[in-house]
Image (cartoon, rainbow, N blue to C red):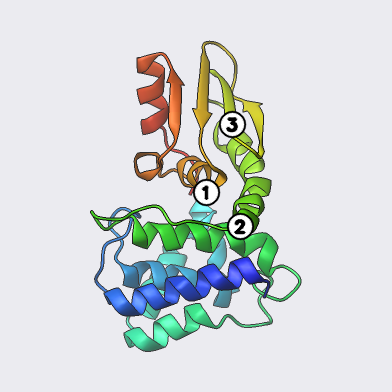
């Protein structure tokens, strides 16, 4: 595993052990136990992982996730912390590419569910790694949004997306844009500039995962 994915994974596991299995997350209806079981399904159960994205398989995936969630808490978190090397998602060749954003987001899902959370000071390297993934995420998440969107990360770059129409600008560091564009708009500290109705529509739009 490469450094950013590994660091976010271990920090999430540490936080889960500290808070326990019943702590809230930003994932509606999910506790830390639910989130941990989701991550285990994603990496360790290829027979069920497709249900995370494919509706026809969702019922089976959920049954598998609930069974895994019933494990002792320390054992469940240990499986999050130490992924199998045979997994196509977490082997040394793919880990940094597919897991840096995944574990950053889920780490923040747990951190930001606390009412007194504060943004972390992230390294320039991690911010840069997140920025590389923000543009594809944003273009996908906002491809149907009825505005001419300009997404800017000062010091990193910008990109345009949306279907056109009124202008709307979203500004923030890559970390906050990652949270915003993954569907956690209310928990992101990003600046939105545009018509008030359009801003509110974007804040409530079903984005990301």
Q: Distance between the residues labelled 2 and 1?
A: 8 Å
When asked about the image quadrant of residue 155, the answer is: top right
The residue to which callout 2 is attached is: 126
Q: Is residue 33 rendered to the left or right of residue 40?
A: left
| Residue count near mark 2 (Cα–Cα under 10 Å), binned few <14, some 14–19, many ≥20 | some
The residue to which callout 1 is attached is: 175
Quarter of the image where the N terminus is located: bottom right
When asked about the image quadrant of residue 112, the answer is: bottom left
Which tag, 1 or 3, sits closer to the chain's start? 3
The residue positioned farthest toward the top in the image shown:
166
Mark 1 residue element:
helix
Tag 2 and tag 1, C-beta contact below 8 Å: yes
The residue to which callout 3 is attached is: 152
| Residue count near mark 1 (Cα–Cα under 10 Å), binned few <14, some 14–19, many ≥20 | many
Mark 2 residue element:
helix
Which of the labelled discs sits on residue 204, or is there none? Answer: none
Regarding residue 41, the answer to whether it shows in the image is no
Q: Is residue 21 rendered to the left or right of residue 169?
A: left
Residue drawn at x 47%, y 39% is: 207
Mark 3 residue element:
strand
Q: How far apart are marks 3 and 2 (CA)?
A: 17 Å
Which tag, 2 or 1, sits closer to the chain's start? 2
Residue drawn at x 48%, y 78% is: 80
Residue drawn at x 68%, y 47% is: 132
Looking at the image, is 180 positioned above or below residue 66? above
Residue drawn at x 58%, y 58% is: 123
Q: Where is residue 90 in the image (x, y as percent from the top left)?
A: 65, 73
């Amino acid at each position: 595993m490469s450094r950013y994915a590994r660091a976010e994974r271990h920090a999430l596991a540490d936080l889960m052990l500290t808070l326990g299995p019943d702590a809230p997350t930003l994932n509606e209806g999910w506790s830390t136990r639910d989130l941990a079981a989701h991550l285990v399904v994603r990496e360790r159960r290829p027979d069920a992982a497709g249900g995370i994205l494919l509706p026809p398989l969702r019922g089976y995936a959920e049954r598998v996730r609930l069974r895994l969630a019933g494990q002792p808490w320390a054992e469940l978190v240990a499986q999050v912390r130490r992924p199998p090397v045979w997994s196509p998602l977490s082997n040394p060749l793919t880990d940094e590419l597919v897991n840096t954003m995944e574990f950053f987001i889920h780490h923040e899902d747990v951190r930001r569910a606390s009412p007194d959370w504060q943004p972390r000071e992230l390294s320039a390297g991690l911010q840069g790694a997140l920025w590389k993934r923000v543009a594809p995420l944003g273009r996908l998440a906002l491809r149907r949004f009825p505005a001419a969107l300009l997404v800017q990360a000062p010091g990193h770059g910008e990109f345009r997306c949306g279907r056109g129409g009124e202008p709307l600008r979203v500004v923030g560091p890559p970390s906050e844009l990652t949270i915003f564009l993954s569907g956690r708009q209310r928990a992101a500290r990003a600046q939105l500039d545009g018509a008030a109705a359009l801003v509110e529509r974007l804040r409530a739009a079903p984005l990301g995962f």
